[in-house]
Image (cartoon, rainbow, N blue to C red):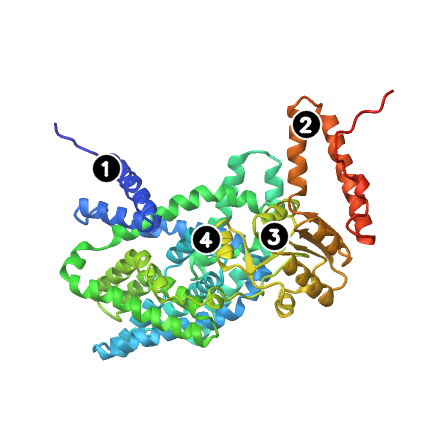
Amino acid sequence: MEFNFNHMELMFLQALLLIVVSCVFVPVFKRSGLGAILGFLVSGITVNLLFSGKFAEHPEELLHFSEFGVVLFLFVIGLELKPSELWNMRKDIFGLGLFQVLGCGLVIGGVCLVLGYSIPVSLVIGLGMALSSTAMVMSQLEESGEKNTAHGKKSFSILLFQDLAIVPLLLMVTLLSPSGESIDTQQSLINLGLALSAIGVLILVGKYLLDPLFKLLAKTRTQEIMTASALGVVIFAAMLMDAVGMSYAMGSFIAGVMLAESSYRHEVEANIEPFRGLFLGLFFIAVGLSIDLQIVVQNWSIILLAAPAVMLVKAITIYTIARLFGNAHNNSVRTSFGLAQLGEYGFVLFGAAVVAGVFNSELSSILIAIVSVSMAISPLFEKLAPLALSKAPEDIIDEDFNDTKGEVLIIGFGRFGQVVSQPLFSKGYDITILDNDADRVRDAATFGFRIHFGDGRRRDILKAAGISRFNAVIICTDAPSTTNHIIEKIQASNPNAKIFARSYDRIHSVELYSKDISFSVRETFDSALELSKQVLIGVGVDENEALDHINDIRRRDKERLMEQVKGDRYSGKDRVHIKAVKPEPL
């Protein structure tokens, strides 16, 4: 039987093949601990091999189209980052980010000079390879639950600067053109003015138009309209930034930040989420498809040696710069290994260099293959990071308190503190959470919690967390001596703060109330009463009557506790039932 497929049928067949291969590789790689990203990359490479490197006539077009996944990804990140938090990151963005690009660019460019390339070529290669993959790094951080950790925020700050740097880097390529083409000062100022104006337009639209727009659309109660409008906002912002020479991702990120304080933020994020995952997966598949297998075969030794070598040089350089900026060893290691791969902006920069005549298309193809291979092996390269980590406990997490927020502080985020936080989050309160267990901080981060690492018994830590501004402090630690110590430090630093504490037992509760705190609850008291209520109902007592008995016990316990605070441990003992209470005769 002979099959003759028309163009449309062939496209459907190719799409089906991509889906089937992805459904095979992605679960396997995720289950093996290598991550879904590598599964998507291998899926693209496999399909590319099946079609002998000719899956599509122009795979770079598929890569360009699939960048919409990166656009949506940056939009969602922006939704989770309020303008005030972004302002707090400015030193890392314009300090650490700037020196990372310049440092890596000069080191890699210097190696190219030694290898015999000219200064313009070395400069373009060095700065192009200094850029990392925003999609790759942020996806890996999200998959591992480390997006909100210290090294996660450092990495994001560097990536954000790289997004900003692509405009001047493209201008640099034009200036290096051997044809003598240049842009005068007036044109440069016009381009800068257009970029700043576009950012200003996005800020004004986000501040004054988006919230009323979503409020109006929400009244239609049509889910499809809300989804379409959310996608429309992303596309508008991306296209506006592209029109003035900046990246699509930068526009969507700014739009997300402008919506971060909107009451419709969660609904917009929920509407975007399915598209984000789909297009982001497509982006990584497209990276695998875009690898020119013929170039790889012809230059396999150069590419397979250069990709890991450049990643190693880049990792060492980033680590050195991060340490010079005062970051702890472990955070510097994680940041350097995470950003070691080359990025999708390398495709753009090297393509522009060919157009400008800085170097030929053959060199560009080799460089693009090196970029693609580095992205493909990035998840494996990052697995080496634990080998370089210090085992010292004090160096596990180096936390800062720049993004503390809200008027409520929770100290201790074990099983008790996690439950306490839920009604407060549900009511809309911003909470700062403090815990000194590094493993717990990391585990909580995998669920999306932002936990600050620090010991609540230390006055300097409380001060750094902003103890003077909190109206309420909830102490959820389990050791009585620790809880008592924390209360003393809080009352010395902020006497007006209302303190709510978990107590170990009745004796500890009496001790806490003697310190004049607002409220204390024994860690097993309410759960025991709830169990007792269910037992009463289970043996046939009416639910309302059972609740009356529970409330009576709760009242008697509180009265006894207050008497013990003023007296001794035997005070109010008559309020405790020691045998069955017989109903009084009518």
Nearer to us: label 4 or label 3: 4
Numbered label attached to residue 145? 4
Closer to the N terminus: mark 2 or mark 1? Answer: 1
Residue matched to label 2:
536
Q: Is residue 225 visible?
A: yes
Where residue 426 appears, x then y in whole percent? 63, 44
Question: Toward the viewer: 390 or 19?
Answer: 390
Is disc 4 placed on a helix, strand or loop? loop
Cα–Cα span, label 4 and label 1:
39 Å
The answer to whether residue 468 is visible is no
Q: Which residue position is annotated with label 1? A: 10
Secondary structure at numbered mark 3: loop
In the rendered image of this protein, does residue 541 appear above or below residue 301?
Answer: above
First in sequence: mark 3 or mark 2?
3
Q: Residue furthest left?
A: 1
The amino acid at mark 1 is Leu
Q: Are marks 3 and 2 in contact (CB under 8 Å)?
A: no
Of pointers 1 and 3, the one earlier in the residue sequence = 1
- 335 or 93: which is nearer to us? 335
The residue under label 3 is: 261
* Image quarter (top left, top right, bottom left or bottom right) of the N terminus: top left
Mark 2 residue type: Leu
**Is label 3 or label 2 in front?**
2
